[in-house]
Amino acid sequence: MKMPIVKSVLLPALLAALMMATACNGGGQENATEPGTATEAVTQAETVFSEETEPQTEAATSAATQAETRAEAPEPTVTDGPETEAPTEAATEAATAPEAETAVETTVETTVETTAETDAEAITEPETEPETETPDEIVVTGPEVIEFDKSIHVTESGSQASVTADGGLTYTAEGYDYVSDIGFVINQDFTVHFTASDVTGADFNRFSICYVSDQPLKGSVTYTENGQTKTDSFFLEAGENTFSCLTTSYLDGLKGKDISSMTFSTCNKKEAEFALCLLKTYDYPVYTNTSEDTYYIQNDSYRLGIRLSWGGGINYLRDLKNKNTVRGVNNLINQADTGRLVQQSYYGTVSEGDYKAGVYNGSQWRYNPVQGGDKEQNHSRIIDIVVSDCSVYVKAQPQDWSLDGQITPSYMENSYTLYEDHIRVDNRFVDFSGMKHPFYHQELPAFYTLSCFDRFNWYDGSEGWTDDVLSYRDDLGFWGDSKYYDDCTILVKESNTETWCAWTNSGVDYGIGLYVPNADSYLAGRHAYDGSPSSKSSSTNYVAPVNTKKIVAYEPLTYSYLMTTGSVEEIRATFKENKDFADNATLHENHQSRRAPDGVPSHTPVATSGILDLSLEANKGAVTPAHNAEVSYDGGRQALKLTVKGDDPNVNVSFSSLGALPTSKYKTLIVEYMIPTTTQEENTRCDLFVCAGSVTSATADCCVRQDLVKDGQFHTLDIDLSGYTWWKGNLNSIRFDFLDAASVGDTVFVKTIGLK
């Protein structure tokens, strides 16, 4: 039986129901998790989690023997016409990838416990980490760029033309409108045919073309594979460009040969001036070293994995430098299905022309290119990969999430680069659909981590990078449930430039952070929270820095972000040191701001103390009469005086002046009180109605009854709340029925009430 999928979704207000439909768990698709069924606080924040063995499928078992081993790649062969050239510099570097790279299972001080069984991604590890170094100068790897001569010479003969490019390429062309100064004016089905001396003979699994075009184009290449004719499609941006593309059988290890033709058509039905100037083919290394097609890069701080069969999204991150981590954690990224990972994902129109988005979990979806794949676990297509020591570039053609195996006319590009204390990711997205998309909340990126990182941290002020107080939440619900969506949406202040966030474990103050300059808001939450440290668990924690943008066809959408690990303060310090690495100015193009005004908190700041000091008269306003009670301040006793005015006397105690009081942090209720000996009733006791989480008013279920001492001395009630099922979320208020049986005029004095 397939397990349900979990996929992040960002929805407008009118699709709140669709948000509920996004409860997805690892595996194939089934019904969404019903709202309100997530297991809260199965593992408390302070718990040190035990290591857990991942379920091992046949594929996972295979992965267990290969997960940390990278086979040495074959040296690539480049073919340009009849002669064979030396490999490019990038390809040569790639071919020298280290052999048998492995990660380590170590015993982490006080928090990690090694067992015989581990995650599938952490199998067969040596006693020590492989020796790695961060290069003195780190260069971000990008797409291959070939310098080329743009001149071609055309000789027409009837409806065909013979072409010789100054770079040496020759071909015949047909299906053009006329010859221009650049090359050809084309519209649909412009075809070039190559002769036997051009691109035949040598095996290849990657090709590069250099071209000039003033319009975006859709192309196809026809060649032979295993004796059969095969055609792969691709897209070209307007400009003077190099385009490199892997064959669709690249990850299967198959090779093509004998490119016979290419066909080009304009995407937007406009005439284009076009010239094909150069064609190269490569016998390219297959950069995978696990059964799950994951390619790793590593330095002395991090080991990063990208799953090529899932569009090159991040499916693995291991921290090699921090010892104060969470027990059982090997991989910080949730990789339960194609919708998880850390990956690009965008939203467009519901329908236009012949296009109609699908239905997902009973709700109408919209155009949604997702780097990893679609809801049915169809994989996105890897288009290109270029590697270097500490950086890797990938290009992918994503699936449309709500459809079944319908790959989108779009490309996603990522450059992943490792530094000593952080990971940099540069993203680029181009949509070739030609559709007109509305403004929509875009995930920048979709970021899935582990359930054991229970606390969401961010800066909620307006004075960024000044070490101002941070905010955090330990009680976020499932962002896809309409009941919690507003609570899971956090708006950035208008003047705030400190736009990072982090998921950490509240017990050991360790986790993973994400910094996206120029982000407007965060959508953050926990799905099926159970505190699991497994990267393949259906439970997951999620955040997406969000901007309201519209996709514009043929125009690149670019942005960059950083990731790092450590304590909250270490994460903040790393981002502060690198705060100017990118400005992401393009995120505010084709954009609608949704930032909050300065000075208005999007969430109540977390309290630094849970105790309300009623020995100070200034705090008297926090306690208000609810029924048959009078509240006054006694300066002599330096305490609040509660006086009975009739039957069932009670007061309401508000803690809003302290800030948020999360139940994951505070476990004990404290009341310091005194009952004078003049009180008329002999049997003195009180009822405390503790309203937390979704409970906002007194109910019998949240009542704690305590006996009190009547001797004219101050005593302290110390009540453990951790065992109550209703003790979850944040404390809202307490109704204090201070004398269960009393006579008019009886009094109780209170110096402190609150949580610790």
Image: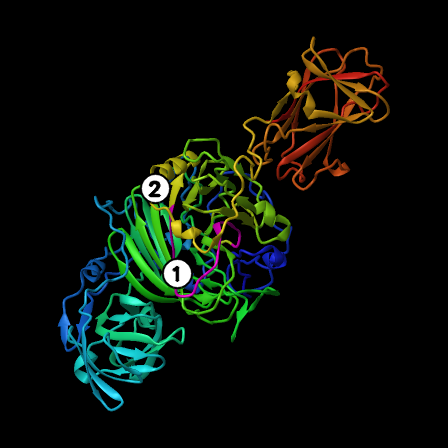
Q: Amino acid at mark 2?
A: Asp
Neighbour tally class for label 2: few under 14, some 14-19, many 20 plus, Cα within 10 Å: few
Helix, strand or loop at label 1? It is strand
Residue 270's place in the image compared with 551, above or below, is below
Badge number at residue 429: 1
Residue 471's place in the image compared with 478, above or below, is above
Question: Which residue is found at the position 24% from the left and 52% from the top?
Answer: 389
Badge number at residue 580: 2
Q: Amino acid at mark 1?
A: Phe
Quadrant position of the N terminus in the picture:
bottom right
Please indicate, yes or no, whether residue 208 appears anywhere in the rendered image.
no
Residue 435 location in percent, x, y?
A: 47, 68
Asked whether 696 or 183 is in front, the reply is 183
Q: Residue furthest front?
A: 181
User: Which numbered disc flags the more N-terminal residue, 2 or 1?
Assistant: 1
**Magenta stretch: dominant secondary structure:** strand
Give the image quarter of residue 413: bottom left
Quadrant position of the C terminus in the picture:
top right
Residue 30 location in percent, x, y?
A: 58, 64
Residue 596 location in percent, x, y?
A: 54, 42
Asked whether 710 or 136 is in front, the reply is 136
- Measured Cα–Cα span from mark 2 to mark 1: 22 Å
- In the rendered image, residue 560 lying in the magenta stretch gets the answer yes
Question: Which residue is found at the position 28% from the left and 75% from the top?
Answer: 274
- In the rendered image, residue 660 lying in the magenta stretch gets the answer no
Residue 296's place in the image compared with 502, above or below, is below
Please indicate, yes or no, whether residue 152 appears anywhere in the rendered image.
yes
Give left or right: position of 360 versus 752: left
Question: Which residue is found at the position 44% from the left and 45% from the top?
Answer: 328
User: The magenta stretch spans which residues?
Assistant: 538-562
Asked whether 669 or 625 is in front, the reply is 625
